[in-house]
Image (cartoon, helix red, strand yellow):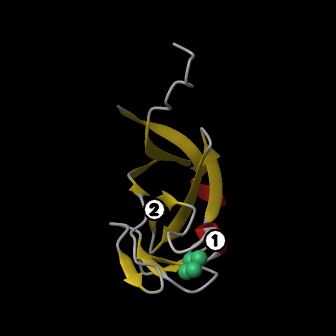
Amino acid sequence: MSTFRPVARLSELEEGIPLRVEVDGRALAVVRSGGEVFACQDTCTHEEASLAEGEAFDGIIECPLHGARFDLRTGAVRSLPAVFPIQVYEVKVEGDDVLVKLPEAQPAAGSA
Ligand code: FES
């Protein structure tokens, strides 16, 4: 099960400048590029850099540490040194709300 969750306001997103948000302990980078809004995992698959500290252009996000690039639509690697794709999430915008489709939070172990 997945549900759309509000993660940011459209008015706080500047073109090409990612915003780091945390939802249920999951860190995401949310970014506006070319008038579209994208969301992906915040942690680069190369090492542990925060993609939200990088920048985005033409539907691509670039890692600030070693410059790997990922496609914000598919998560695919567009430039080394990363070799593994990132997780991307479906986004919808309703008014000023940016909503991201996330899996339901797993109940904590032993809480059932
Ligand atoms: S940590 Fe992202 S490219 Fe190295």
Q: Residue at x 38, y 82 (%)?
A: 78
Mark 1 is surrounded, within 10 Å at the Cα level, by few (under 14), some (14 to 19) or many (20 or more) other residues, namely some
Residue 22 visible in image:
yes
Q: Quadrant of the N terminus?
A: top left
- Whether the residue under disc 2 has CB within 8 Å of ligand 1: no
- Whether the residue under disc 1 has CB within 8 Å of ligand 1: yes
The label shown at residue 61 is none
* Closer-to-camera residue (108/79): 108
- From what the image shows, is residue 28 above or below residue 16? above
Location of residue 36 in the rendering, given as x and y in whole percent from the top left corner? 43, 65
Location of residue 43 in the rendering, given as x and y in whole percent from the top left corner? 57, 63
Mark 2 is surrounded, within 10 Å at the Cα level, by few (under 14), some (14 to 19) or many (20 or more) other residues, namely many
Provide the residue designation for mark 1. Answer: 49
Image quadrant in which you'd find residue 49: bottom right
Residue 13 visible in image:
no
- Name of the residue lying farthest toward the front: 110
The label shown at residue 38 is 2
Q: Residue at x 51, y 58 (%)?
A: 41
Location of residue 82 in the rendering, given as x and y in whole percent from the top left corner? 46, 79
Answer with left or right where residue 58 lies relative to residue 97: left
* Closer-to-camera residue (88/18): 88
- Give the mark nearer the N terminus: 1 vs 2: 2
Tell me the distance, in whole angstroms, between the alpha carbons under discs 1 and 2.
18 Å
The local secondary structure at tag 1 comes to loop
Amino acid type of disc 1?
Ala
Tell me which image quadrant ligand 1 sits in: bottom right
